[in-house]
Every structure is written in C-alpha cells, then in structure tokens.
Amino acid sequence: MRIITSLLLGMVMLPAVMAQQSIAMSNARWTVSEHLGPNINNILYIRTSESGYDTIIDGKVCSKLFWYNADVPFGALWDNMQGQVIFYRFQDSSEHLLYDFDVSVGDTVHVFNEPYQWDPIIVTAVDTITVADTPRKRIHLFNSEVYWIEWIGGTQGLLTTCGCITVSMAYWLDCMSADNVIQFPVDLSGGEGHCFSPAGMVEVGYGHVLRIYPNPTPGRFTVEFPDPLLKDSYYSVYDAMGRLLYQRPLPTGATVEEVDLSRFGRGTYVLRVTDPEGQRHERVVVE
C-alpha cells in the first residue's frame, strides 16, 4: 500500500510518463451546492478564465480560479501531466495536492479538502467511464457515494475532495462544463451548455425553496411546496453521481408530497421538482 502525502512544497517537475491532462484548465465552470443545515442551502460558482494557463507559480504554468464574476482570483490549478492536480491557495500562499489519478486500489491519499481538514482517503476501486464521448478514469473513495473523475474533479465539488459528509455541512457537484460542453452530470455529458446557465442545471424560475422534513431521514420524508403545484408538475430523484433513479408526477394544486427513498439505501440524494415555471431542488440525506 502506498502513502501519498498532500504537502508538495518544493515539488519538481518530472519527465512526462502519463502525459495526460487530469483536470480542465481553460473555460471550465463548476456549480456546487453547499448544505449548511436543514433547508439552508447555497450555490457556489467556480471558474477558470476562458483561455486558462494565465499565471506562472514557481516556474509552473497554472490556471487562475475565480468565484463566479469576480475579477480577483482566489487560487490556481496546476496539472503536472502525471496524474496529480495541485491547488495554490492565494489566501495563505499554500500549495496542496487536490487530486491524484495515478493511484491503485488500497492506496491512501492525503489531499486538500476545503473547508475540511480530515483523515486520509482510501482508494477502493478504479475504473473508466465515458464522459462526453471521451474515456475518463474514475477513482472510487472509501465513501462509495464520492468519486474523482478525470477532467471534472470530485463529485463533492472542485475543492472538497475528501468524501466527507456531515449532517451540518455537505458539498455536492451539480454541474461541470468545459468549452461550453456539459461534462457532469455524466448522463447529460456531451450536451451544449455551461454551468452558469439553466442548461447547466442551475435552478431557475423560483425565489422560494422546498421544505423537506425530516432531513436527514431514515427513508420516508415530507416535501412541502411554497405554493400550490401547477399542472404537469413532477419530481425526479438523482443519486450523488447525478444519475436519475426515478420520476413521479405530482397532483395539480398539491402543497405537500410524501416520498420514500428507503429502498435505495443510505446516502445523499437530490430531489428535483419541475413544473412549467422552472425547477428547484434540495439535498436529502438517508441514514
């Protein structure tokens, strides 16, 4: 078993062996849901510049990272073309391993996890999936709901890579796009669009959120809608990888709906409600 450490200060560039890019470095966008407690949710937007490769740090050509429409970067990425992705955090001038795709089953990896600083990650499986007609390596972590996917990053978002989930705080990747092509969710990959638009799975059409209780839940829970449902409303349930599990129609005029996810087992799910005016969604944790 290998132990791979996160602190890479003084790391030198080695001759290319893999010579394969591991993360999108230009015109890339990530939309991340932040769960801070029952019915307290935010959406975070992270992007590179359109051209990327726009700064040099310690002799390495990196891509700056920005919050949504901010002009000042908060950090930068460096892909060493050997499977490792390095994050430079400008706040404290620190350097951290963000992802390592050159791993095998049983390896232990110490990575940077914003905002967590938790225990090391154990790799439980490595396979390949197709994303936008391109084969990408997928790394399964000790938490079976969380993956790293080449080019995309982690299913908890670009900067939260540890597989950590708590009742009080959780992060999940809603969408990732590169060069105006959707990369995540994987079952929608290849479609035209970007992650700061409705095509990129950003909620549209609502100023009010759903109320879900209890959450966390043993499986059964109640969904309360802020307004009576319109005709042709329905809900969809997705797993942590963004895969559609099932859909159900909703009765016109309803203000509550009972949902049971117990048959899918423990995990984190997304409940998305759609009607002619738009979409809204909430995270549901089944314990």
Image: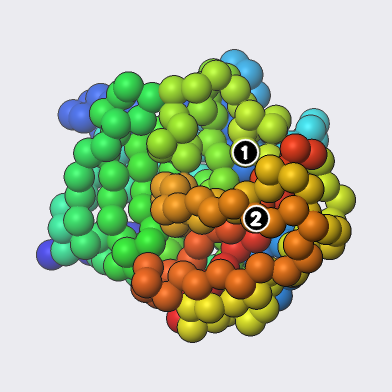
Earlier in the chain: of badge 1 and badge 2, it is 1
Percent x, y for residue 213? 67, 78
Instruction: Identify which residue is drawn at 56% across, 40% down.
Output: 175
Percent x, y for residue 43? 71, 51
Residue beneath label 1, please? 201
Q: Quadrant of residue 40?
A: bottom right
Residues 122 and 168: in front is 168
The amino acid on which the numbered mark 2 sits, given as a three-letter code, is: Leu
Residue beneath label 2, please? 250
In the image, residue 112 sits, relative to residue 176, either above or below, namely below
Mark 1 crowd level (few <14, some 14–19, many ≥20, 10 Å Cα) = many
In the image, residue 39 sits, relative to residue 17, either above or below, namely below
Residues 123 and 56: in front is 123
Percent x, y for residue 255? 78, 65
Instruction: Identify which residue is drawn at 21% across, 30% down.
Output: 18
Percent x, y for residue 108? 25, 64
Residues 166 and 67: in front is 166
